[in-house]
Amino acid sequence: MGAEQSIERMTATQITAKKAEGAKIVCLTAYDYPSALVCDAAGVDLVLVGDSLGNVIHGEATTLRVTMDDMLYHTRIVERALKRAMLVGDMPFLSFSLGETEAVRNAGKFVVCGAQGVKLEWQPGIERVVKAIADAGIPVMGHLGLTPQAIHRIGGFRVQGRDAAQAELMLREAGRIERAGAFAIVLELVPTELARRITEAVKIPTIGIGAGPHTDGQILVFHDMLGLTPGKKLKHVKRYLDGFEAMKKAVGEYSGEVRGGKFPGAEHGFN
C-alpha cells in the first residue's frame, strides 16, 4: 500500500480569497479533540479555539479568567485533530494589551502550539497590535461588536452598534483593522444593516455571529449549535441537534441497564 495522502490545510490567504470568489466561509469553535475531529470531517473551513471555553468548558460567567496557559493547552489538543481546517487561537484577556512586543510574543506561542493565526478583540489602538503581529508573519483576525473581554465596560451581553455614533466607529475601526494587515474580521451581535455596510466597506472577509446573513461567513459555538448547553437559548443561534437530551437519554439507558443487570452482557466479556 502507498503512503497515506496528506490533506492540505486551509490558509489565511485562501480564507481571504473566498470573499472575492463569493464563497461563504464556514467557521466553528472547538475546544477539544473529539469536537475538532467532527468539525474537520464535516468540512468546516476555519476552527477557532475561542476564549469562550471559559463559559462553555470551565463554567465561568465571563471569559476574563481564561489564561494563556488555558488557551495554549486547548490549542494543542484541537490541532492534533485537524487535517483540513485552518486553526485560529483566541488571544485572552490582557495577553495583547500591554504592548506590541508582548502581544507578538504571545501570538507566537499560539503558532508554536499549531495555530495558523490568532484572533484579537477590539480595543482602542488595536490596529498597532494587529500590525505588529501581522508584520511578524502571523495571520490576525479582528473582532468587532460584542467583545466579551470588555464586558465590564460594555455593561452586558447586548447588541452593539445600534446608535449612529457607535456604528460609524465600528465602520472606521473595521477599515483600520484591515489596513493594519488582518485577514478577516469577526462581527459579533451587530445589527444586520451595519454588518452589511462593514462587509461592503472592507476587502477582507467578515465572519458573523448574530450579525445577519450579509457577512462573508458565519461562526457559532460548537456546543450551542449542537444543543449541548441546556437552558441557554440565544436568538442568534440555530440548534441543529438536541444534543443534551440525546446524551442524557443514552446515559439514562446505560444507568438502567447497569442497575438492572443487563449490562454488561456475555458479548461484552472475554474468555
Image (cartoon, rainbow, N blue to C red):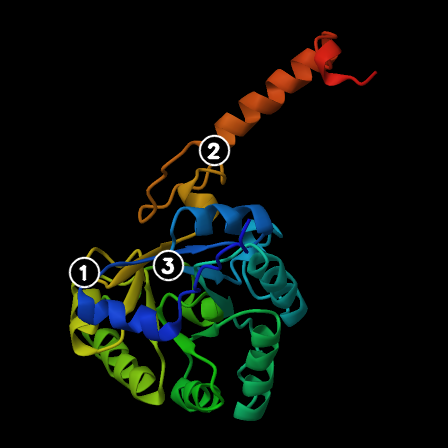
Disc 1 crowd rating (10 Å Cα; few below 14, some 14-19, many 20+) is many
Label 2 and label 1: CA atoms lie apart by 28 Å
Give how far across and how far down residue 24 sits, in percent.
24, 59
Q: Nearer the viewer, residue 142 or 20?
A: 20
Q: Measure the C-alpha gap from mark 3 to mark 1.
A: 18 Å
**Label annotation for residue 5:** none
Who's the residue at 74% across and 10% down the image? 266
Image position of 136 with respect to 85: above or below? below
**Residue 152 in view:** no
Q: Earlier in the sequence, mark 3 or mark 1?
A: 3
Give the Cα distance between marks 3 and 2.
Answer: 23 Å
Label 2 sits on a secondary structure element that is helix
* Residue on which disc 2 sits: 243
Choose top left, top right, bottom left or bottom right for residue 99: bottom right
- Could you tell me residue 124's position as x and y percent? 40, 85
Q: Which residue is mark 1?
A: 214
- For mark 1, give the secondary structure: loop
Q: What residue sits right under mark 3 in the picture? A: 45
Answer with left or right where residue 217 lies relative to residue 129. left
Point 35% across, 86% down: residue: 181
Q: Is residue 52 visible?
A: yes
Amino acid on which disc 2 is placed: Gly
Residue 147's quadrant in the figure? Answer: bottom left
User: Which amino acid type is shown beneath numbered disc 3?
Assistant: Asp
Front residue of this view, candidates 83 and 193: 83
